[in-house]
Image: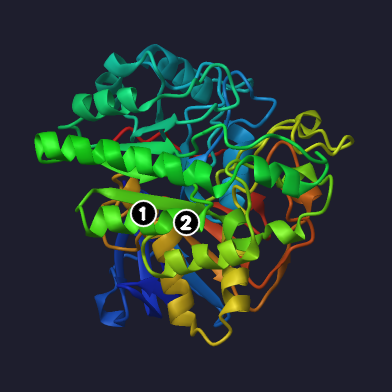
Amino acid sequence: MVDEIKTITCDRIFYNGKLQPGILSYSLTSGKIISITSQDEALPENITHFEKLHSSRLIIPGIVDTHVHLNEPGRTEWEGFYTGTKSAVAGGVTTVVDMPLNAIPPTTTVENMDIKLKAMTCSENGGNKLFSDICLWGGLVPDNLLELKMLIKNGVKGFKGFLIDSGVKEFPKIDTDYIDSAFEELLNEDTVLMFHSELDNGCCQNNGDPSKYSTFLKSRPDLFEVDAVKDVINCMLKCFAKNGKCPRVHIVHISSSQCISLIEDARNLHNLPITCETCFHYLTISSEDIPDGETIYKCCPPIRSNENREAIWKGLFDGIISTVVSDHSPCTPDLKNLEKGDFMDCWGGVCSVGLGLYLLYSTLKKENPYMDDNSVWSNITKWICENTSKQIGLENRKGFLKKGYDADFLIIDDSETFKIDNETTFFKNKLTPYEGFESKCKVVRTVLRGINVFSENEGHIDSPIGKFILN
């Protein structure tokens, strides 16, 4: 078989840690990058396709979104592999990692995982459901401790548990005794344990007008997150004191800036292997701007004040928060209870898979007008490509533009704008708080393993080529 090689030359490609002129060559046969260089003489000899991009365009690695709820099987009316990954690639996301809930059954046992995999590969027309590549997280629930090692062997990248009610009965919360036992069980495994860190300490009553966002916000104060993060860190300290080491820990969707110093001290003073993430909505929306009754803004933990939002940005710039993810958590419109507008009686979750680059880039540029392009794209690729690939152990394959890596990348035009319109989004239930948001850049093409899976002119690929990544 003759190897088909394509070469793209571009004035701005993000590789080797900076935005610079480059020539990207990759195999359409193997789907791997052959070379990325600034020197013409280093080009492969048997190039079969050549393209030069306009100066307004740039290339960055494919985005890796490590926090996506696709909900299939069981709640496919909420989302699904096909629509969720279709939305992902439209925004430059080439790899998603599916959370163990809200599918029925959740990915908490090997048997449940097999059901998930069958759902992933079964479709009415026999075609592939996946536009992007996909990995799986497993779940931490009270009765699955002895399943964890087998789930790792079967390909899950790590585990997530809730320290507060998850909102679905299939995924009960865990306590610190379980965390202690899980640390011991997985002490010698190459994996990561993630925690939804809110702890209902009974301090707050749900009093007030339920149509006002402030009522909901008061019902889930910063203290919920702070107490939970402290509990997780204490479990890590106990494990470290007993064994001289501890499994890696990742705190998901940090919303309270009060948690940042706790995680910084755990890492720097106690040498604990702990990281954390935040979400696009915590960086772009402030509680002061949420209108009464607009339940599309509800998520857990909640969106907090603008002062808090600015502190989250600082934690990100300081490197304490390492990644930014969507936490795409969709549901059917009736569960948002929009007509009633009751924040205390509706599903909590924000739809945003595939929208994150637009939100992050535009907010970063607006609030840091003097930041040069290299710094802008260096930060963005670190937060949504590089560090997310490291979190799932794929940093030798995804998240960077390097020789031998998957040819996953997106082409962006930062001279064009893109306006988010709920009705033209690709996820199943078209409810976002971002209606009318105007981005200062536009994704014009998404490439997965060398193949164009989305472009602004041709739309999505007819036959999706996404794969489930086991290792």
**Three-letter code for the amino acid on which mark 2 is drawn:** Gln
Q: Is residue 208 left or right of residue 382?
A: right
- Characterize the local packing of mark 2: few (<14), some (14-19) or many (20 or more) Cα atoms within 10 angstroms: some
The structure residue drawn at horizontal position 81% and vertical position 29%, both measured from the top left corner, is 334
Q: Which residue is mark 1?
A: 262
Residue 77 on image: x %, y %? 70, 25
Which of the two residues, 156 or 25, is positioned nearer the viewer here? 156
Assign a secondary structure to mark 1: helix
**Three-letter code for the amino acid on which mark 1 is drawn:** Leu
Residue 314 on image: x %, y %? 47, 69
Which of the two residues, 27 or 89, is positioned nearer the viewer here? 89
Q: How is the image coloured?
A: rainbow
Assign a secondary structure to mark 2: helix
The structure residue drawn at horizontal position 51% and vertical position 25%, both measured from the top left corner, is 120
The structure residue drawn at horizontal position 27% and vertical position 26%, both measured from the top left corner, is 182
Q: Quadrant of the C terminus?
A: top left
Which of the two residues, 208 or 150, is positioned nearer the viewer here? 208
Residue 396 on image: x %, y %? 26, 52
Q: Is residue 270 left or right of residue 193?
A: left
Which of the two residues, 423 or 257, is positioned nearer the viewer here? 257
Q: Quadrant of residue 416?
A: bottom right
User: Is residue 107 in sight in this rendering?
Assistant: yes
Q: Quadrant of residue 23?
A: bottom left
Q: Which residue is mark 2?
A: 258
- Characterize the local packing of mark 1: few (<14), some (14-19) or many (20 or more) Cα atoms within 10 angstroms: some
Q: Are marks 1 and 2 in contact (CB under 8 Å)?
A: yes
Q: Is residue 438 left or right of residue 138?
A: right
